Image (cartoon, rainbow, N blue to C red):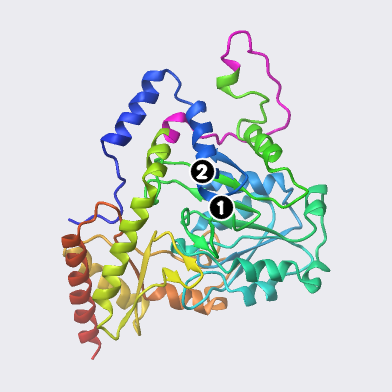
Amino acid sequence: MIPFSPPRIDQEIIDEVVDTLKSGWITTGPKTLKFENELSAYCGNPATVCVSAATPGIQLVLSWMGIGEGDEVIIPAYTYCATGNVVIHSGAKLIMVDVNEDDFNINVDKIKEAITERTKVIMPVDIAGLPCDYDEIYNLVNSPEIKKLHSPSNEIQKKLGRIAIISDSAHSIGAIYKEKKAGSLADVSVFSFHAVKNLSTAEGGAIALNMPSPFDNEELRKQLKTMTLHGQSKDAFSKMQLGAWRYDVIESGFKCNMTDIQASMGLVELARYKGNLARRREIMTRYTQAFSAYEWAKTPVFEQEEKTGSFHLYLFRVNGISETERDEIIAEISEKQVAVNVHYLPVPMLTAFKSNYDIKDYPQTYKNYACEISLPVYFTLTNEQIDTVTETVIESVEKILAQQS
């Protein structure tokens, strides 16, 4: 069987984790701090806070910004449910908009149509690791027409003076937009280091801070670090120093800190990430070359003139098929022991959301989803396995298409 996305757990990872275990310090400590600093250096943003997962990371940022009842947050309808869940949990109203046909990312024209005086945050999602059109989004929120609508409800929002851009960058660490890396493209970007991501810490994430002047990103880092630990003024590592037990709880925070065990994995993964990206690019290029001869194949965009993705997902589409036929193709592929996936079931189609949202209002989202099949992409995938995947997909698609005629 060819799996879809196994984690890369090799001796280098094992040795670093064992080193942490033997150190006697396994929760948030020196390795987490080192990982945060190295992430900032890699992404080019001023400061970074590591967290237990991307979802609580976004939740934390929304809380810091004071997003709540009466506010609206705009997201794409084509994303994982976490992007919507954090908005629901904040108490704000979730506003979903449609996406682009070519790259699955949020449609800026649709954002403009959705903005009201209640809009406090736009949350673009770099689907599959390809950056969104950040310049267009910033031009929109900085335009006099949109700025005039901005109605801040607290000092942070007033200080920013416009709608905030919080990027769900769960897929896009290492991606580049106009010579800047993900993490330095939005006011705040949040990465995921889940087991299936390019860079994995098993579970985990990071908040990349890039707030404009007059915000102090280093001070904000300290504040968010405190918020990851229930609002406690000292982390466990600081408290354990001789005689340093006393602490305070400054605010009612969360519990979503990263551990040094997770950071150990992250440090190894980040050090070799350049090679990881290069191999993922090779895999995607090989897929695209194999499918280029077939009119029914719609290969994904993972590089453009001013964008280089992180090569996280290969969102392959089959032209002209229905959702049912797509599922039949996946069944055929699976019978041949090749694991594929679908990214994603659109948020409006999920039970938790569809009572308030209708997928018919997001036609491009549904069209993209109905014919999409995600193919395996990971560092240890061999060229022989890539060829097996492509041959299996071609055979399976042509079998189902033949049944149509």
Q: Residue most toward the bottom?
A: 405
Farthest top residue in view: 243
Q: Are marks 1 and 2 in contact (CB under 8 Å)?
A: yes
> Mark 1 = which residue?
183
Residue 298 drawn at (x, y percent): 35, 79
Tag 1 secondary structure: loop
Does the magenta portion include 7? no
Which residue in the protein does label 2 denote?
39
Question: Toward which corner of the image does residue 185 lie, by quadrant?
Answer: bottom right
- Of label 1 and label 2, which has the lower sequence position? 2
Q: Residue at x 39, y 59 (%)?
A: 312
For the question of whether residue 117 can be seen, the reply is yes
- Which quarter shows the C terminus? bottom left
Q: Quadrant of residue 299?
A: bottom left
Give the extent of the magenta segment.
239-263
The three-letter code of the residue at mark 2 reads: Leu
| Picture residue at 48% right of the left edge, 73% below the top | 305
